[in-house]
Image: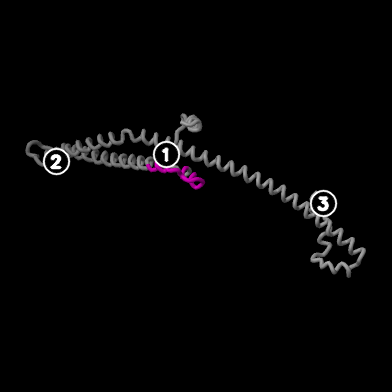
Amino acid sequence: MTVKEESFKAALSGKKIPILTLDNKWHKLFTQTEATPAVQSLEKRLTDLVKRQGKLNTESKDIKKIKRKLMDEIIQLADRYGGDRDDMIQKAMERHREMVEECNDRLKALREENGNIPEQIEETNYQLMLRTMELCYKRLEENRKEIEYYEGWIEETRAKLRENMVRKQERETSTYELYTYMHNIFGRDVINIFDMHYHPEKFRPKKKEEGYID
């Protein structure tokens, strides 16, 4: 057992865990991460156990209803029974008693089959929770590392952007000053031979309120 699994077990100690496969919130976890083969195997086993328990419980309820009906009919037949001449009623009562015994036998078999299913469900559900916690922990760790990487990248890019914006402003200032100096000395006609593509006002240094970066 790993240290992490021990910590997971300690966190789950004394807590009532819902049947995970019946919990929509549990299924939503796997929109964020992919289930491992171990999780998929436990999920299938738990689903099969829950279905089997439900089927046994339903059959048990149905048989109990049949048994109650048979018992009521036996009482009604007994009220009508008038002695040796009522052979048909006697046979009907015997048949009803036989069917009641068959119901009892089936109920006993169902109880025996269902006997350890609750424990199996609880243990399988517990193991599924442990595997789920391991999977989520791994995914959280991966996310944390990626977040740290992107935070570093963003900060580095932001710093580089600030640096390049300052350099751009320096070049714009230099261009404006050179153009203005040459224009003042040589005049517009001489300056035109430099084929300037932008109006010098574009390179006029911005004031702080206009977005200049120190």
Residues 146 and 191: in front is 191
Q: Is residue 79 visible?
A: no
| CA distance for labels 1 and 3 | 63 Å
Q: Name the residue under label 2.
A: 92
Q: Nearer the viewer, residue 85 or 17?
A: 17
Give the labeled residue for mark 3.
208
- Measure the alpha-carbon separation of dots 3 and 2: 106 Å
- Ranked by sequence position, the earlier of labels 3 and 2 is 2
Q: What element carries label 1?
A: loop
Image vertical order of residue 54 relative to residue 181, above or below: above
**In the image, which is nearer the foreground, mark 3 or mark 2?**
3
In the displayed image of the protein, which residue is found farthest to the bottom? 189
Query: How dense is the environment of label 3, judged by Cα within 10 Å: few (below 14), some, or many (20 and up)?
Result: few
Residue 116 place in picture, x, y as percent: 33, 33
Residue 206 sits inside the magenta stretch: no
* Amino acid type, callout 3: Lys
Instruction: Name which quarter of the figure residue 58 lies in.
Output: top left
How many residues crowd around disc 2 within 10 Å: few (fewer than 14), some, or many (20 or more)? some
Q: Which residue is drawn at 87% across and 67% down?
A: 191
Number of residues whose C-alpha sits closer than 10 Å to that of mark 1, classed few (under 14), some (14–19) or many (20 or more): some
Which of label 1 and label 3 is nearer to you? Answer: 3
Residue 177 visible in the current orientation:
yes
Magenta part, dominant SS: helix
* Side (left or right) of 211 relative to 110: right
Q: Which residue position is annotated with label 1?
A: 19
| Amino acid bearing label 1 | Ile
Q: Which of marks 1 and 2 is nearer the N terminus?
A: 1
Magenta residues (range): 26-44
Q: Look at the numbered disc 3 and give the secondary structure of its residue.
A: helix
> For the view shown, which residue lies furthest in the left direction?
85
Tell whether position 32 is magenta. Answer: yes
On residue 186, which mark appears? Answer: none
